[in-house]
Image (spheres, grey):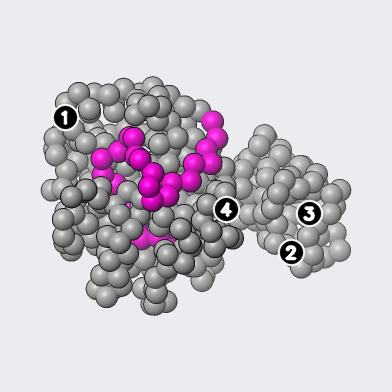
């Protein structure tokens, strides 16, 4: 398989720059035996009693910081992962890459020493607790295709209503469509809820470098799947319900925790790269947003729903002016059926 097999044309005007006025106001493309246009508020009608929705409860941190070098040059720091109270791995954008031992100075007089590199990232030792600095001076790390600075409304809308565990630098965007009332509507129908935690990294936006897909590796992300989630899945299977992942990050977490078709508690790192031909072990349906061309996330949904079927659905979405990417519309996917 080649990266170019997963390309499609997307007009700039279909890339949603802002969220809808209400979370549930997005559209929902139902990709079943046919393509059906729905509203996200119709979701409860697609669910059945004893189904299980699995959400990613990671919380987006204010991961973007502005700094200057001792020489005065401006830099942008994007925290990828907080390693300890005063140490973080970060992407540093500057005219020249900072050298080990050099100092970055932040506007509130906090400082960070560049300890070294870890691949494309820098290890930074801060003079103050990292999370405190982010809360005081950080910005919401909007994706690069949102060609605007973060605004006050992004503090709320680039965060799910059930976000709990801080650590992500990108939102699990399929969950952005749920408001509290929708969560209650699904519960009232007899749908269970369970939660995993996958701290989404900035690598989710990085392009794959090799045309031959098999030559690529994905960024590592932190995953936690607890026994409560595993128990909810077991009870759902026993009751004949479906396990429905809310977002590709929930899929990646569940599949990383699957052993011989059974989801077991897991706390660690995952580099799982799901491609067409992959045999899914944990889910029966998926709610997801529309993903970037040639991206690993597009390959994941193609693996689940079928490459031709997904590319046809994306072409339909473009023709019918669906909104794309993080603040865009959603899809409800069921697996590709084998004749």
Find residue 98 and report its horizontal and vertical position in percent.
Answer: 80, 57
Q: Which residue is mark 1?
A: 240
In the rendered structure, which segment of residues is drawn in magenta?
A: 268-292
Q: Residue at x 39, y 73 (%)?
A: 10
Of circles 1 and 3, the one toward us is 1
User: Which type of secondary structure does the marked residue at label 1 adopt?
Assistant: loop
List the residue tagged with mark 4.
Answer: 215
Residue 75, image x, y percentages: 72, 62
For disc 3, the marked residue is: 104
What secondary structure prevails in the magenta region? loop
> Which of marks 4 and 1 precedes in the sequence?
4
Does residue 160 appear in the picture of this structure?
no
Please tell me whether residue 324 is drawn above or below residue 199 in the rendered image.
below
Q: Residues within 10 Å of mark 3 (few under 14, many from 20)?
A: many
In front: label 2 or label 4: 4
Question: Which marked residue is nearer to the observer: mark 1 or mark 2?
Answer: 1
Say which of 104 and 249 sits in front. Answer: 249
Identify the image quadrant of residue 320.
bottom left
Residue found 51% across the figure and 56% down from its top: 213
For marks 1 and 2 on the same chain, the one whose residue lies earlier in the sequence: 2
Say which residue appears at 25% left-offset and 40% top-offset. 284
Q: Which residue is mark 2?
A: 94
Alpha carbon of mark 4 to alpha carbon of mark 3: how far?
35 Å
- Between marks 1 and 4 in the image, the one whose residue lies nearer the viewer: 4
Given contact means CB atoms under 8 Å apart, are the residues at marks 2 and 3 in contact? no
């Amino acid at each position: 398989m080649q990266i170019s097999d997963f390309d499609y044309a997307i007009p700039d005007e279909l890339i949603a720059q802002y969220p809808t006025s209400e979370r549930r106001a997005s559209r929902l493309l139902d990709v079943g035996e046919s393509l059906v246009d729905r509203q996200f508020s119709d979701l409860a009608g697609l669910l059945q009693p004893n189904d299980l929705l699995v959400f990613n409860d990671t919380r987006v941190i204010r991961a973007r910081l502005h700094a200057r070098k001792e020489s005065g040059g401006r830099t942008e720091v994007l925290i990828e992962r907080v390693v300890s109270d005063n140490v973080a791995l970060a992407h540093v954008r500057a005219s020249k890459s900072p050298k080990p031992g050099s100092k970055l100075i932040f506007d509130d007089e906090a400082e960070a020493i560049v300890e070294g590199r870890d691949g494309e990232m820098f290890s930074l030792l801060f003079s103050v607790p990292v999370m405190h600095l982010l809360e005081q001076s950080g910005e919401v790390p909007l994706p690069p295709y949102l060609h605007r600075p973060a605004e006050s409304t992004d503090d709320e809308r680039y965060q799910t209503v059930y976000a709990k565990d801080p650590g992500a630098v990108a939102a699990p965007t399929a969950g952005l469509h749920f408001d509290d009332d929708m969560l209650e509507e699904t519960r009232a129908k007899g749908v269970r809820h369970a939660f995993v935690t996958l701290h989404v990294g900035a690598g989710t936006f990085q392009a794959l470098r090799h045309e031959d897909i098999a030559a690529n590796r994905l960024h590592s992300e932190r995953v936690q799947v607890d026994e409560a989630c595993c128990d909810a899945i077991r009870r759902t299977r026993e009751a004949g319900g479906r396990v429905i992942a809310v977002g590709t990050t929930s899929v990646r977490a569940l599949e990383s925790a699957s052993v011989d078709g059974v989801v077991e508690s897991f706390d660690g790192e995952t580099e799982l790269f799901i491609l067409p031909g992959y045999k899914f072990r944990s889910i029966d349906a998926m709610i997801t947003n529309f993903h970037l061309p040639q991206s690993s996330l597009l390959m994941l949904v193609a693996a689940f729903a079928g490459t031709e079927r997904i590319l046809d659905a994306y072409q339909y979405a473009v023709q019918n002016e669906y909104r794309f990417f993080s603040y865009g519309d959603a899809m409800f996917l069921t697996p590709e059926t084998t004749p």
